Image (spheres, rainbow, N blue to C red):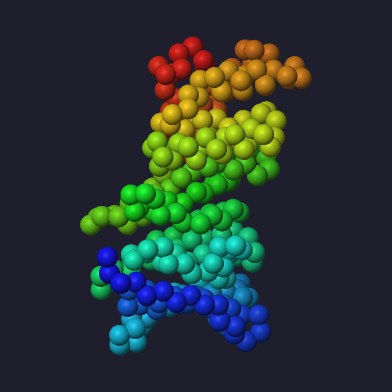
Amino acid sequence: MKHLLLALALLPCMGAAQAAEVLANGYSVRFDERIETAPGDLHGASVGRIRLVRTGDQALVWQENTPLQPGCGAIAAVTVLDDRFVALCGHLGGRHYTQKIIFMQGNSPAMVSVDQFDSPSAVRVERDGSLAIDVLRRDLFPGELTGPHYFPTVYRLHHDDATFGFVPSFDGDAAERYWQHYRATRQAAPAASVLPELLASLLAAQAGKQSICAELDTLAADLQQGRQYDAQGARTLMRTWLHKLPAIGYPALDTQACPGRI
């Protein structure tokens, strides 16, 4: 493994502006807060600038003006993940968070972005060295669902000669995270108010060690509490959402694993 030089500092700038910088693998990665001076909707607003400089000759390799401001609450604006990757996290006026990942090896660093909507979470380096990140997607069924509904998705970075980007993951390792999200959501709200999210989590967790069949029975029973739904109505509602959720990327229900449940 190449020697990795890390230097992380928050540097105070004029006024409330901030800058974060790391040195890694012969590059300086800097995420500055600035005031937009160009005409347009963002004129006068706090925005950001990302700069990637090769430390050997101080050559500017990459510069991007972005509407994002540096930092995501507890998540630093710039983080060295390992000897290959640096993560940058920014926000739009204290909401709507985005992570940017820079691949630092070779002569041409590459960047990919992940929209994290309202709930930032840190990029993880998995046991096999791959990168993963949890995203709670929203606004996926406009006109059908009112209020914020958050659908969990674990993304893994796919990187080869042809592809550099994050793709949804529903493998056994990711399944445990979906299961945890299901349990937390289950305890936080009545099943009827978060049924699509609960079913999405169960579909996503099918590759894991936990069987989802009993949970489908429990959800059907819970929907009948308060007599809002009878047994047939509860099953019909669940079947409707189980058929819709694959359209937004979730695996279809393995009916052979749970025969007669829906």
Determine the residue positioned at 48% across, 27% down: 210
* 89 relative position to 92: left or right: left
Q: Quadrant of the rendered structure where residue 28 is?
A: bottom left
In this rendered view, identify the residue nearer to me: 131 or 100.
131
Determine the residue positioned at 45% across, 36% down: 175
| Total numbered circles | 0
Residue 58 spot, x, y in % from top left: 34, 87
Residue 81 spot, x, y in % from top left: 41, 63
* 152 relative position to 23: left or right: right
Residue 25 versus residue 220 in the image, above or below: below
Determine the residue positioned at 56% across, 81% down: 11
Q: Is residue 33 visible?
A: yes
* 134 relative position to 158: left or right: right
Residue 250 spot, x, y in % from top left: 45, 35
In this rendered view, identify the residue nearer to me: 40 or 68.
68
User: Can you say which quadrant of the picture contains the N terminus?
Assistant: bottom left
Residue 135 spot, x, y in % from top left: 51, 49
Q: Quadrant of the rendered structure where residue 85 is?
A: bottom left
Residue 55 versus residue 121 in the image, above or below: below
In this rendered view, identify the residue nearer to me: 230 or 143.
230
Determine the residue positioned at 57% across, 74% down: 47
